[in-house]
């Protein structure tokens, strides 16, 4: 017999998806400019996105039976989603703070934000558009209030404000995953200020440490998860700083992998939630081990893991829509709710559908969006160079017109 909250079905689902990532079509995933990435982190992303989806899979069972969208009673499945989000925050901070540390000149923040908008925005707008379209079809929207149109506008702003259903009676069709994007954008908007500290050898280490200590104390005293999110970003920044200063652990990757695995087991065996000081520090420690070389015995660096990582944004963002598709069919829903074994069978098929949806979205939406952003940035840079060159030419011409011709004047005088 299979229980709804048994641990092994989650691992069985991920193992079953492994052959799917080996399909020939998956060879096309990826972005052109990925040479600077760490392969293990790319591979890590896919499993984090799948972890969040499995977290919501058990929540969805409660939603189908009672109509309530709430944290699952299982500590394992509760932590699965929260730890996944925690690592995503750490990764974002590590990557972008690392760019500031390695930059040889002042960073072009408007270009950075524009690229992020084209990286995040196209698929986000598509997903949000589909979610709002479902609400329109269900005719639950009150068109007489200005707040409805205000929500629709804010929903389309590439995740800066997250997604709020147009109808207050509607549970988010996107599995309520978009709440993380405003925190990501706040971090991006803070980078110009953070860049001031990135140039000083002491401040670049002091800033992450101070933020990490501040968030730990703030969370312990006030119990707000916002302090934890800040601490996770600080943890990623600290890992990037330690790497930039060549302070990584010089230990064999298998030993690092064993330690990282032991920390994860301790995390899941000890805590009920991940948004607390202890889990925050443990997640940061695991990520530091990965940056130092831990690859979980080759799992994270495997080609199929990296491929899943490349489509992780789609897996993360489209999971709610993937759940809606099979469970909107009455016969499938009744079959799934008959017992836990049948529910997990439907979840397995749903997760396979989600991976395929994410693959298609990556090829049709994400990659073209990134390419368009790169083209636009290149054109803006070219226009800026031309404008600078024209200004310099105009300035030289003006100076030439204002300067007297001494040779001519001398000849005339003689």
Image: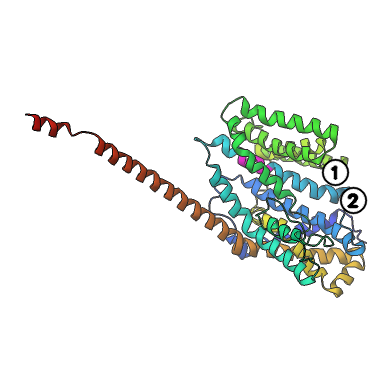
**Predominant secondary structure, magenta span:** helix
Q: CA distance from mark 1 to mark 2?
A: 10 Å
- Residue 328 forms part of the magenta stretch: no
Farthest residue toward the top?
202
Residue 74 is tagged as 2
Q: Is residue 297 visible?
A: no
Residue 157 is tagged as none
Residue numbers of the magenta segment: 91-96
Residue 332 placement: quadrant: bottom right
Disc 2, SS: loop
Residue 311 placement: quadrant: bottom right
How far from the left and from the top, in percent, is residue 14?
76, 57
> Is 142 or 348 nearer to us in this picture?
142
How far from the left and from the top, in percent, is residue 347?
81, 63
How far from the left and from the top, in percent, is residue 391?
36, 43
Farthest residue toward the bottom?
331
Name the residue tied to disc 1: 273
Seen in the picture, residue 93 relative to 411 is either above or below; the reply is: below
> Is 134 or 35 nearer to us in this picture?
134
Give the quadrant of the C terminus: top left
């Amino acid at each position: 017999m299979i229980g709804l909250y048994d641990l092994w079905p989650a691992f069985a689902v991920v193992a079953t998806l492994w052959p799917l990532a080996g399909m020939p079509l998956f060879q096309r995933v990826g972005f052109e400019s990925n040479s600077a990435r760490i392969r293990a982190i790319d591979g890590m992303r896919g499993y984090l996105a799948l972890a969040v989806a499995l977290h919501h899979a058990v929540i969805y069972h409660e939603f189908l039976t009672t109509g309530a969208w709430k944290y699952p009673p299982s500590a394992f499945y509760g932590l699965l989603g929260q730890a996944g989000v925690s690592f995503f925050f750490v990764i974002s901070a590590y990557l972008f703070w690392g760019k500031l540390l390695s930059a040889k000149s002042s960073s072009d923040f408007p270009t950075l934000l524009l690229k992020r908008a084209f990286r995040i925005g196209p698929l986000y707008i598509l997903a949000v558009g589909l979610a709002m379209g479902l609400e329109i079809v269900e005719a639950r929207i009150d068109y007489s209030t200005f707040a409805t149109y205000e929500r629709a506008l804010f929903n389309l702003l590439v995740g800066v404000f997250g997604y709020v259903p147009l109808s207050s009676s509607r549970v988010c069709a996107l599995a309520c995953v978009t709440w993380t994007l405003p925190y990501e954008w706040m971090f991006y908007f803070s980078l110009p200020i953070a860049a001031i500290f990135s140039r000083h050898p002491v401040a670049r280490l002091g800033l992450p440490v101070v933020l990490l200590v501040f968030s730990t104390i703030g969370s312990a005293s006030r119990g707000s998860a916002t302090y934890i999110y800040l601490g996770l970003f600080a943890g990623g920044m600290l890992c990037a700083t330690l790497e930039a200063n060549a302070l990584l652990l010089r230990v064999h990757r298998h030993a690092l992998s064993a330690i990282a695995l032991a920390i994860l087991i301790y995390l899941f065996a000890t805590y009920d939630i991940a948004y607390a000081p202890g889990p925050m520090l443990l997640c940061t420690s695991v990520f530091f081990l990965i940056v130092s070389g831990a690859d979980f015995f080759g799992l994270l660096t495997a080609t199929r893991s990296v491929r899943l990582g490349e489509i992780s944004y789609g897996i993360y963002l489209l999971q709610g829509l993937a759940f809606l598709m099979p469970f909107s069919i009455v016969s499938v829903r009744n079959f799934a709710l008959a017992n836990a074994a049948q529910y997990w069978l439907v979840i397995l098929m749903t997760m396979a559908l989600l991976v395929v949806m994410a693959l298609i979205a990556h090829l049709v939406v994400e990659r073209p969006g990134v390419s368009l952003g790169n083209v636009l940035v290149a054109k803006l840079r070219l226009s800026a160079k031309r404008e600078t060159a024209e200004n310099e030419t105009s300035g030289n011409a003006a100076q030439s017109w204002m300067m007297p011709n001494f040779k001519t004047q001398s000849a005339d005088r003689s």
